[in-house]
Amino acid sequence: MVLWRRSEEFEAGTNFIAWACKVAYFQVLAFYRDNKRDSMVFNVELVSMLAKQNEEKLAGSQDLQRILSRCLAKLPEQSRRLIQERYAPGASVQSIAKEQGRSVGAVSQMLYRIRQLLQECVQKTLASEQGENLS
């Protein structure tokens, strides 16, 4: 409800999840402030530490999304289109197979191979970027 009430503060084009987590962080701090006599409430240091860890995880997931986008762009057009079709809202392997006139098994196998290529690309890119950061 707080996010809804404060929605006008969100700047379009920025990271919604990061903004929502920051709002939640301040809500937790406000709750702590208002209930500081309650012995069951976390201390401020713990809440701050948890918030920092969450920010680091979000940053890591954004890096993974950036890398995955680059890897998707490297795929052949037909493979990229198949992945996009599969993860479109309401899509299923069965519906794609029917649309393409292929068996469900064939589409599943193609998706499996594409996912393997994406996984390898992401892992290689991560290893490469980590190697660059160490130099």
Image (tube, rainbow, N blue to C red):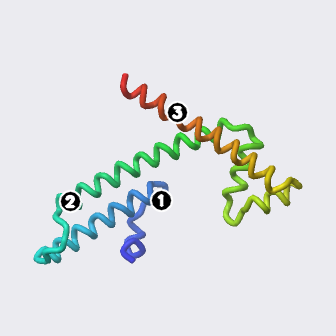
Relative vertical location of residue 133 with respect to residue 86 in this rendering, above or below: above
Along the viewing direction, whichever of 8 and 132 lies nearer the viewer: 132
The nearer-to-camera label among 2 and 1 is 2
Disc 1: CA contacts within 10 A as few (<14), some (14-19) or many (>=20): few
Which residue is the site of mark 2?
Answer: 46
Q: CA distance from mark 1 to mark 3?
A: 30 Å
Q: Identify residue type, mark 3.
A: Thr
Relative vertical location of residue 64 with respect to residue 38 in this rendering, above or below: above
Left or right: 37 with respect to 77? left
Q: Earlier in the sequence, mark 1 or mark 3?
A: 1
Along the viewing direction, whichever of 10 and 110 lies nearer the viewer: 110
Q: Identify residue type, mark 2.
A: Leu
Q: Residue at x 42, y 74 (%)?
A: 4
Disc 2: CA contacts within 10 A as few (<14), some (14-19) or many (>=20): few
Say which mark, if any, is on residue 25: none
Measured as percent of width and height from the top left, residue 90 is found at: 69, 66
Left or right: 75 with respect to 5? right
Task: Describe the element under mark 1 as helix, strand or loop.
Answer: loop
Q: Residue furthest front?
A: 105
Total labels: the figure holds: 3
Q: CA distance from mark 2 to mark 1?
A: 31 Å
Which residue is the site of mark 1?
Answer: 12
Say which mark, if any, is on residue 125: 3
The N terminus - image quarter: bottom left
Q: Earlier in the sequence, mark 2 or mark 3?
A: 2
Relative vertical location of residue 52 with respect to residue 68 in this rendering, above or below: below
Relative vertical location of residue 18 with respect to residue 127 in this rendering, above or below: below
Q: Identify residue type, mark 1.
A: Ala
Q: CA distance from mark 2 to mark 3?
A: 34 Å
Disc 3: CA contacts within 10 A as few (<14), some (14-19) or many (>=20): some
Q: Residue furthest right?
A: 101
